[in-house]
Amino acid sequence: MEAKPRERTFIMVKPDGVQRGLIGPIITRFENRGFKMVALKLMSPKKDMLLEHYEDLKDRPFFSELVTYMHSGPVVPMVWEGEDVVKISRQMLGATNPADSKPGTIRGDFSIDISRNVIHGSDSVEAADKEISIWFAEQEIVNWRSIDEDWIYE
Ligand code: UDP
Ligand code: MG
């Protein structure tokens, strides 16, 4: 059954997260919170996708290392849907630098180094729209109704 889409965000397990077997634990956190997955794939990202994805950071000193890291193995891009999903998922990720990420957050539980922080999440609804369009074709996003929704939302 189709449902009216709620807010969407773009989440990606980075190459270190894939290599370290964290795809499952990360997905579980989003499922447990009550968010709905509407797109998912495993892929080796093309460099031009990464350049577009991180376009805003191109003048930062760490940019070329960031692109090399993100290009070093497969990633798992995803789209998750739910009320306030952009803000809540940023909280679930924790601070960019794992040294500042609280225990209980994904980065705070699974990482140490800012340049190996296992997961990406959009920082605004506008960024989410842009990132979703970089990583997914419209037909790869599935509009479906979860039976949980009547119990997750009033
Ligand atoms: N990054 C890094 N060194 C830094 C800052 C950022 O390697 O000093 C990397 C890190 O992987 C981070 C990504 O660049 O997740 C994007 O940076 P941003 O500031 O957008 O952080 P995020 O939105 O991922 O928390
Ligand atoms: Mg960012």
Image: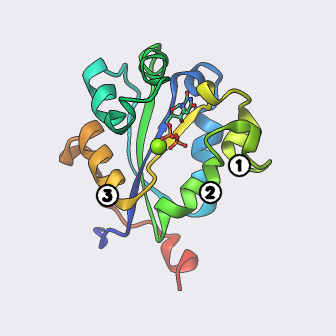
Nearer the N terminus, badge 1 or badge 2?
2
Circles 1 and 2 in contact, beta carbons < 8 Å: yes
Q: How many marks?
A: 3
Q: Position of residue 76 (x, y in %)?
A: 45, 32
Which residue is located at x 44 percent, y 49 percent? Answer: 122
Nearer the N terminus, badge 3 or badge 2?
2
Residue 12 to residue 148: above or below: above
Q: Which quadrant holds residue 3?
A: bottom left
* Viewport quadrant of the N terminus: bottom left
Q: Position of residue 31 (x, y in %)?
A: 57, 55
- Binning the other alpha carbons within 10 Å of mark 3 as few (below 14), some (14 to 19) or many (20 upward) gives few
The residue at which mark 1 appears reads as 105
- Label number found at residue 91: 2
Q: Position of residue 43 (x, y in %)?
A: 37, 24
Which residue is located at x 32 percent, y 68 percent? Answer: 5
Ligand 1 under 8 Å from disc 1 Cβ: no
> Is disc 2 placed on a helix, strand or loop?
helix
Relative to the observer, which residue lies in front, 133 or 32?
A: 133
Nearer the N terminus, badge 3 or badge 1?
1
Marks 3 and 2, how far apart at CA: 18 Å
Q: Mark 1 is on which residue type?
A: Thr
Marks 1 and 2, how far apart at CA: 7 Å
Relative to the observer, which residue lies in front, 17 or 125?
A: 125
The residue at which mark 3 appears reads as 126
Q: Is residue 57 left or right of residue 119?
A: left
Q: Is residue 56 left or right of residue 154?
A: left
Which residue is located at x 35 percent, y 29 percent? Answer: 58
Q: Mark 2 is on which residue type?
A: Gln
Q: Which quadrant holds residue 78?
A: top left
> Is disc 3 placed on a helix, strand or loop?
helix
